[in-house]
Amino acid sequence: MSEIKVTPLGAGQDVGRSCILVSMGGKNIMLDCGMHMGYHDDRKFPDFKFIAPQGPVTDMIDCLIISHFHLDHCGALPYFTEMFGYAGPIYMTHPTKAIAPILLEDFRKISVEKKGDSNFFTSQMIKDCMKKVIAVNLHQTVHVKHNLEIKAYYAGHVLGAAMFQVKVGNQSIVYTGDYNMTPDRHLGAAWIDKCRPDLLITESTYATTIRDSKRCRERDFLKKVHECVDRGGKVLIPVFALGRAQELCILLETYWERMNLQAPIYFAVGLTEKATNYYKMFITWTNQKIRKTFVQRNMFDFKHIRPFDKSFIDNPGPMVVFATPGMLHSGLSLIIFKKWAPVENNMLIMPGFCVQGTIGHKVLSGVKKLEFENKQIIDVKMAIEYMSFSAHADAKGIMQLIQYCEPKNVLLVHGEASKMVFLKEKIKQEFNLDCFMPANGESCFVQTDMKISIDVSVNLLKEEAVKYNSEPPNPLKERQIHGVLVIKDSSISLMDVDEACKEVGISRHIVRFTSNVQISDSSPINKTLELIYDQLLSYLQDKSQEYKIQLTESSLSIDSVLLSVERIDDKNKRVFVTWPNQDEEVGKIVLHVLKSMSNTQGTSYQPIELG
Amino acid sequence: MKVYSLSSHPNKACYILRFKEMTIMLDCGLCALPLMHFLPLPIIPTAKFNNLPSWIPRECTEAQLEGELKECCGKVFVDSAPEFQPPLSQLVDFSEVNMILISNYLSMLALPFITEGTGFEGVVYATEPTLQIGKFYLEELVQYIEKTPKLTSASHWKDISHLISPFSEDIKPRSWRQLYNLQSVYASLARVQMVGYDEKLVGLTSFYIKLYFLYRCIEFAIILYWKYYSLSSHPNKACYILRFKEMTIMLDCGLCELKECCGKVFVDSAPEFQPPLSQLVDFSEVNMILISNYLSMLALPFITEGTGFEGVVYATEPTLQIGKCNVAYGKAVLLHSDLNNITCDEKWMRDIKNQNESGSVLVPCYPSGVIYDLFECLSSHLDNSSLTQIPMFFISPVADISLAYSNILAEWLSDCKQSKVYLPEEPFPHAHLVKTGRLKHFKSIHDDAFNAEFRQPCIVFCGHPSLRFGDSVHFVQLWGSNPLHTIIFTEPDFPYVEALAPFQPLAMKSIHCPIDTSLNFNQANKLIRELKPSTLVVPDCYTHPPPSFPQRTELVIDQVDRKVLTLKRGEVLKIPLKRKRTRVNMSAEIAEAVEPCELRPGLAIASIKGNLKVKDNQYCIDMSSSSRHHQYETGALDVEQFVERLVHEGITDVKVEPNATGYIIHLYH
């Protein structure tokens, strides 16, 4: 038995700062390197000291994989590489590599320039860090180093999101990152083949939810926005620059066109065009429909959606505004929120998950009076709506993924402990799999089967194949192979006995037993043989299938046991039976049968032939 | 293993490999050279081709031949729907083909001939760009021909083809076929399964197939490695290199001792089933050569070792990653575009400049490939020559698709193009050229918009490069009589004199400036030297100098120091592959039951018996339900001691009888 050790530094029974350490087959892999947006102290980054309390961290980590560009998955990357000193390889997909630095820079600005966070990475560090990133394609098998291989699968969650399979020798894990099992307006559904990993590390954000159909949620969203705009209210939708924002834009764009609405829609992301440009360029990472129609019409060329200017905040009349960041923790969305919150007619739609500690989380949990740093108190009178557009797999989706890839063990991360417990039980019940849910800093050991690969002589296989093919086809019958394992240092090979003897340089002996049994039977020789044959079959009964029995006019053979009959006189015959020691068992059986047929005893003798 | 060659044209390859009960087709190129023997299909009916005199060989009295052959300026053409030469179908039953691996879009044009109506049931593998670009190549080809249907279909001329001067026996017009229709194109494409770059396809065979698609400006090359994983200590592998860009199909196979590093990996990883990827990294250095290939497609002398280019390309980095590899690509590409400008300046840019003061330029081309580069360097050249006002027209039924796709496949482009996406900017500038109106694209000349926009002088890019169908036919007719106009041939597929033959007499200038993205012989030889294949299979024509330059003996593939086998259309090669060991998985249960007998430290043997499971050509040994056990005797043989022991056990009546090979011990009782 070998084992895989998993230690979450973040995302263990928690959402935010995903960072999971996996050790297997002597290799250490870090999966994601995220930050926690609910904290401003040291807790915002994973506790990297855990990896190497003293020594340089690069020696301790063989490779670092980033699943997608969300900051809770890649936010600590520049810190880890530029300030903590990790210099090993970093892998992510092309879109992630393109988009992550923009989000990192955005977040850095907010944290350092607005909040005055110290101990934060600089713009230059982000650039230096991204230069070290190796971009991978879907399904590309990347050989990281000796014995360590990774492969990306489509995850759907956001543009460029990937699940990663990591293989070390015979052991393998799949890390899902965040994923989505239902295709949405611009992304496809996650897909993985039956790769049967030893361990599946899956997110479990929506471990207990089975979401109602996507279409209903969309209709609901459009209805609410429409109602609010109709009564002259302002709608604020806090989003992250890339991802959900584009999906909602497509949704509103088509709705506005169909309903011929005039209220302006603004996209206050600062990088509107840039952001959607990424989508245009990475069309191959979106879903089938967009890919098919993009030549005629690019879905990301919006007509109704215009860039936002800060001066528009106080404009009268209805409007819809998309603003960053998505959890209302800082930035423009928070500024707009502060202005609009006290007006009853307005509406806030939170289209995604909010980390604990953010304003978004507070508002959603029903807090009606918010106090800010400068003693500013805001009454929340605007309508608050939570719509889960967040593209995570729900409980059904997680179960589906387990079914797809058939793991031997499951480990849950990126979710709340109580929900994990529920899902864990469900997985145990439905799939009969061991399921783990370690907390941050807690190591968990997963036992895996040993897989042994040996080298088999082609001749041995060919002989078997010839034998097998000469027999009538019987799918129930085992294809038996026997030979000698030669274990030389660390290599194991299987070959037939003669080859093995040659290989190891030993001489083989054949011990052959021979015996005569006299039986009284007056029929011709071939009849006697038939009689023995019948006796033997009735003795072996259904086990006779296991032996290769051949009857000819003058002899009978059972595997390598040979039997011949000689006439002594009219009434008596001598049965001559011989077998090599390797078929001692069969020989005994045959002799036993013969002896039971024999009426005279004592005349037989057993020569042993050694050679 | 057997290798079949089904194609006569080395750049339109089609090979079949048979090995381990698998039949695999490598590429299926369509040879379009027969087109040269047909009359063009004009878009707008003209008297020119109709009024050509009929031609009948003097020896022939066949009445049905009337009107099938026409003569133009001393050359004979067939007046019929054009025909192509698909891969040979008699040699292999296509229904037995398990899979088809397509290396690039130029090598898939015969796909409908192989997969439709033949009982083919296998899978076709290609990368996404190959599939998408190949799709519109096929569509364009079919649409061109369907747009100008030929009512008559001549066939009798084939009976007397030996009497027609350009038709020698080698050409075999009987094997020519008319093109498929769109329906079979789509049916055929539906069988294509996309594979990713560097993706491992498992479960098909015990081979491990690794596809390397190396991509440059939507020109791909592929190196296909077949690795047969046997015992680590017996690195018994077959390795093919197949189709480098447009030039050569090199298949090398057999026992391949690939440098020391792979040996090391094998020894290190002895007990495990581990792909020797460091070996692949080694090959990715070879990829670089493919890059230099691109450089030298322009046949410029300064692209050799002395330029330091090789130094830039990772000779020093043994553990290259693909990403890094792309950096080198970028370098090559940068160089390439410089070179492109230089040659263009030298060769035909100058002509364009002169011509454009009064005349127009026609560039017959395929809908994808080198045209993206041409748009790029031509537009900047026009800017520099203050000819910005001269419009470029790109006419093809798939022009919009081609331009759109080229800008979304950035992952497959060189690093410098790829890095643009991160900004985010479009990798090729033609989207910008379209936006600013410098480059205009139309579905055909019948497009109303085209008639509104068309003005001369201009530069027109349109298909088909054979000048037998498509809009290019129209422009040759339109501009042919005016010596101010120019036609420039950039696609190397067709001999330009023959392409122009049915239009003669022509007054327009013609310039032949083929841009061939293939490896040249020098590079191919260098590549082969580095790969050190034990057996090399090359098309026969690469082993002697090209017929047009018989004295240039350097234009061959080196045959020194290695086993070189050659292959022609219709030939089959048998390549002995010696396999001694194969990798098999053993279940933990059976491993636990093994009772090894130690012979000396580090060496043990054990007899085992198990249940052999074979699935997808992969073996696994599991616990057998049979309890029978085999024993083998070895060791020193001491008969006296044996007899003593028998006596000790109470068996006293023992008689020993020595014979030739050992002893017989008689026990009476």
Image (tube, helix red, strand yellow):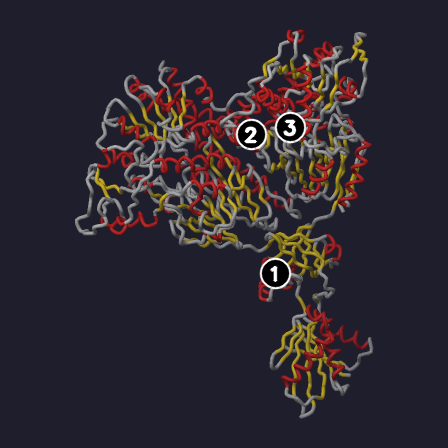
The local crowd at label 1, few if under 14, some if 14 to 19, many if 20 or more residues have their Cα within 10 Å, is some
The local crowd at label 2, few if under 14, some if 14 to 19, many if 20 or more residues have their Cα within 10 Å, is many
The local crowd at label 3, few if under 14, some if 14 to 19, many if 20 or more residues have their Cα within 10 Å, is many
Tell me which corner region of the image, top left, top right, bottom left or bottom right, holds residue A400: top right
Callout 1: helix, strand or loop?
A: helix
Callout 3: helix, strand or loop?
A: loop
Residue at 76% of width from left, 81% of height from top?
A: A596
| Image marks 2 and 1: residues in contact by CB distance under 8 Å | no
Vertical comparison of B375 with B126: above or below: above
Vertical comparison of B275 with B514: above or below: below
Chain letter of the residue beneath label 2 in the structure image: A
Q: Label 2 sits on what residue type?
A: Ile
Residue at 21% of width from left, 31% of height from top?
A: B505
B213 vs B294, nearest the viewer: B213
Residue at 72% of width from left, 13% of height from top?
A: A345
Q: Say which residue label 2 marks.
A: A290
Along the horizontal axis of the image, is A311 left or right of B188? right
Which of the marked residues, 2 or 1, is nearer the chain's N terminus?
Answer: 2
Asked if one can make out residue B172 in the rendered structure from this viewpoint, the answer is no
Q: Say which residue label 3 marks.
A: A158
B180 vs A597, nearest the viewer: B180
Q: Position of residue B382 (x, y in %)?
A: 37, 17
Q: Say which residue label 1 marks.
A: A460
| Image marks 3 and 1: residues in contact by CB distance under 8 Å | no
- Residue found farthest to the bottom: A570
Q: Position of residue A244 (x, y in %)?
A: 65, 24
Which of the marked residues, 3 or 2, is nearer the chain's N terminus?
Answer: 3
Q: Label 3 sits on what residue type?
A: Val
- Same subunit, labels 2 and 1: the answer reads yes
Which of the marked residues, 3 or 1, is nearer the chain's N terminus?
Answer: 3
